[in-house]
Image (cartoon, rainbow, N blue to C red):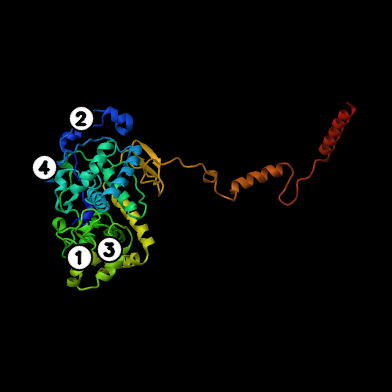
Amino acid sequence: MAERLAASLLPAASPSPSARRATVAAAAAASFPSPCSARAGLRLRSRPPLFSQKAAGRGCGLRVVRCMAASDAVQLKAAREDIKELLKSTYCHPIMVRLGWHDSGTYDKNIKDWPQRGGANGSLRFDAELSHGANAGLINALKLIQPIKDKYPGITYADLFQLASATAIEEAGGPKIPMKYGRVDVTAAEQCPPEGRLPDAGPRDPAEHLREVFYRMGLDDKEIVALSGAHTLGRARPDRSGWGKLETKYTKDGPGEPGGQSWTVEWLKFDNSYFKDMKFLSQLPWKEQKEQDLLVLPTDAALFEDPSFKVYAEKYAEDQEAFFKDYGEAHAKLSDLGAKFDPPETEEPTLVAVGAAVATATADDNNGAAPQPEPFIAANYSYGKRELSDAMKQKIRAEYEGFGGSPDKPMQSNYFLNIMILIAGLAFLTSLLGN
């Protein structure tokens, strides 16, 4: 299903094995300095088509340029602006969210080795993974994003997919996602995860199925419900997922390609309307639910049927601010699952790997792209304590008492010294007057 929760966890197609040897041209490096140039020199090499005609239904003519190092911060910032323009012209917000989710959603926390553990590693660009049933239709997302990848070869596919996903949420009116970048790409189709790791929309026990899939990723009930709220965007199409209607009164005229069935009335606006609509629709008998113009999947209804899920679903239906906060955190966590960062991640949470540099990140850092220098604030570097330590107090007291003083009485004056100072002052004044 194009926009269902199962679909929202798609992976992306990768370059063919021969593409593994390719790097960025020296001319491109001059315009877009990338971590590649800092490593082993640059070579330009042409690529075979990214997708086979058999898999795509027709030749795409797409080229793949792979960079061995992580993404360049300057190119990330520029690519984000291009993604914004792409969203404005094609209304592809839902499928971009799905692209990022499906690349990272194959993660298995029980597998420690990379890339066998799956996750956000760019493997979805390979036909081997793109052909998985849950990824139906994602070839369209790859065709849209590939020109941006060609334009900015210093960005990995893994980073580009997650950048597009987070930007789509934000541009649709959703929360700012605290993203970080520097994910490393897999290099061969043999490194793709096996099929079956993404959620299904209509399992026998929807709540148990959601937990089985998302617990495997290391996510909890709150994160499951929050991420489900992304169904406020997009539509399901029966030719891709087997779910939904061919069209409804909300989708027959687009925007974008007409048709499909949406979960919400304004299906290109990110808000908490999904939870409001599901709260009402889930109370209807299943037969009546299927007759509605808004889509309700078994996994959607489970959010208001399962006692643990229901706590969060009802909270989000009433409190959009709480939903945005929890969604932003859950989306950022999902986007990092299974990823290997270059440079490696540090233990300091405020440091973010971006290309070959480590940059300070903030909650509104444009998805981690080219952060600006932080202004100097003296208070941030102060000692931060109003009280002196006991050792310092004792040291000051000892010095004070050394001059004859005491905490109980003022230090006695040295009258002889005072008289000598007075006489010297008078003598100086006399000499001045005499002159």
- Residue type at mark 4? Gln
Residue type at mark 1? Pro
Residue 421 falls in image quadrant: top right
Mark 1, other Cα within 10 Å: few <14 / some 14–19 / many ≥20: some
- Comparing labels 1 and 3, the label whose residue is closer to the camera: 3
Residue placed furthest toward the left: 54
Q: Is residue 325 left or right of residue 264?
A: right
Residues at marks 4 and 1, CA–CA distance in whole angstroms? 35 Å
Q: Specify which label sits upstream in the sequence, 1 or 3.
A: 3
User: Is 189 on the left or on the right of 184, as rendered?
Assistant: left
Element carrying mark 2: loop
In terms of secondary structure, where does tag 4 sit? Answer: helix
* Residue type, label 2: Arg
Q: Circle 2 is placed at which residue position?
A: 45
User: What is the CA distance from the residue labelled 4 to the residue labelled 3?
Assistant: 36 Å
**Mark 1 or 2, closer to the camera:** 2
Residue 205's place in the image compared with 28, above or below, is below
- In the picture of the structure, the residue carrying the numbered disc 1 is 298
User: Alpha-carbon neighbours of circle 4 within 10 Å: few (<14), some, or many (≥20)?
Assistant: few
| Along the viewing direction, whichever of 348 and 366 lies nearer the viewer | 366
Q: Nearer the viewer, residue 245 or 433?
A: 245
